[in-house]
């Protein structure tokens, strides 16, 4: 995990306007840990000086003054991955991406269609024909690499966040008066994701209860080898409710 100290999250890494993408700062705090979970407590602002603090030997926190925004800890990620798709199937699914014509947050770092090729990840996970999953091809830019280790953790986590949301929403749309708010994201990396090499990103719905929806996501090589897997939990709440997931733990 990164050492304690100050951090400012660049506005480039937004999810919704003025709020940082959960996968980005979750992966940033996780550092080199291959299996970790981020627990989101409050929205993380962009462009503001925040503090990273080690809570104990296992947990790292991101704080805004006295307020705990997120904490990250080592974790297992037990997710059953559905049968994988081919690279051709992922390309066809990308062409069916619904966010191209209608997107609530078109400047999202991961899935926003208004982000440029070298600016956003441009992972457009659309429905796979005949399957209850979404998928997109992804060839990471060289600028995302962390030396010879492949794509840096903050970008890998970012790549896994939005496809799981799209899968959940496509299986059972969220009412227009409501929104899904990320409360937990757990990621386990099993192999490097190398820049300039084609990959497949998949997303699928896992389950739901009265107030939460859970989705899974995976990154695979173009030939189907697993690189990373994620489990993502969201709370569904009315738009008028303040963004403060800590109240719903």
Image (spheres, rainbow, N blue to C red):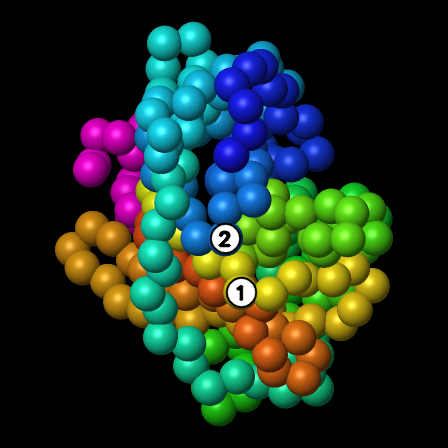
Task: Tell me the residue that label 2 is attached to.
Answer: 34
214 is higher (above) or lower (below) than 114? below
**Who's the residue at 26% across and 67% down the image?**
207
107 is higher (above) or lower (below) than 29? below
Point out the stretch of residues depicted in magenta. 235-249
Q: Position of residue 115 (x, y in %)?
A: 75, 47
Residue 49's disc is none
Q: Can residue 62 be seen from the camera position used here?
A: yes
Q: Residue furthest top?
A: 65
Q: CA distance from mark 1 to mark 2?
A: 7 Å
242 is higher (above) or lower (below) than 235? above
Task: Tell me the residue that label 1 is attached to.
Answer: 190
Magenta residue check for 238: yes
Q: Residue furthest left?
A: 210
Q: Position of residue 89 (x, y in %)?
A: 64, 86
The secondary element bearing badge 2 is classed as loop
In front: 45, or 16?
45
The secondary element bearing badge 1 is classed as loop
Lower sequence index among marks 1 and 2? 2
């Amino acid at each position: 995990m990164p050492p304690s100290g100050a951090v400012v999250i660049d506005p480039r890494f937004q999810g919704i306007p003025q709020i940082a993408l959960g996968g980005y700062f979750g992966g940033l705090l996780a550092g080199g840990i291959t299996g970790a979970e981020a627990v989101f407590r409050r929205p993380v602002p962009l462009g503001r000086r925040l503090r990273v603090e080690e809570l104990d030997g296992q947990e790292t926190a991101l704080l805004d003054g006295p307020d705990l925004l997120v904490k990250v800890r080592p974790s297992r990620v037990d997710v059953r991955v559905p049968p994988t798709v081919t690279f051709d199937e992922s390309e066809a699914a990308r062409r069916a991406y619904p966010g191209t014509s209608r997107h609530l947050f078109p400047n999202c770092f991961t899935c926003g269609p208004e982000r440029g090729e070298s600016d956003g990840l441009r992972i457009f996970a659309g429905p796979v024909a005949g399957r209850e999953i979404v998928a997109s091809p992804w060839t990471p830019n060289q600028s995302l690499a962390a030396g010879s280790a492949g794509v840096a953790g903050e970008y890998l986590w970012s790549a896994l966040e939005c496809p799981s949301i799209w899968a959940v929403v496509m299986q059972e749309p969220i009412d227009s008066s409501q929104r899904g708010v990320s409360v937990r994201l757990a990621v386990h990396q099993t192999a490097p994701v190398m820049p300039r090499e084609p990959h497949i990103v998949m997303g699928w719905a896992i389950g739901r209860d009265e107030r939460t929806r859970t989705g899974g996501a995976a990154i695979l090589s173009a030939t189907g080898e697993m690189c990373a897997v994620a489990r993502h939990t969201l709370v569904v709440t009315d738009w008028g409710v303040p963004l403060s997931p800590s109240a719903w733990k």
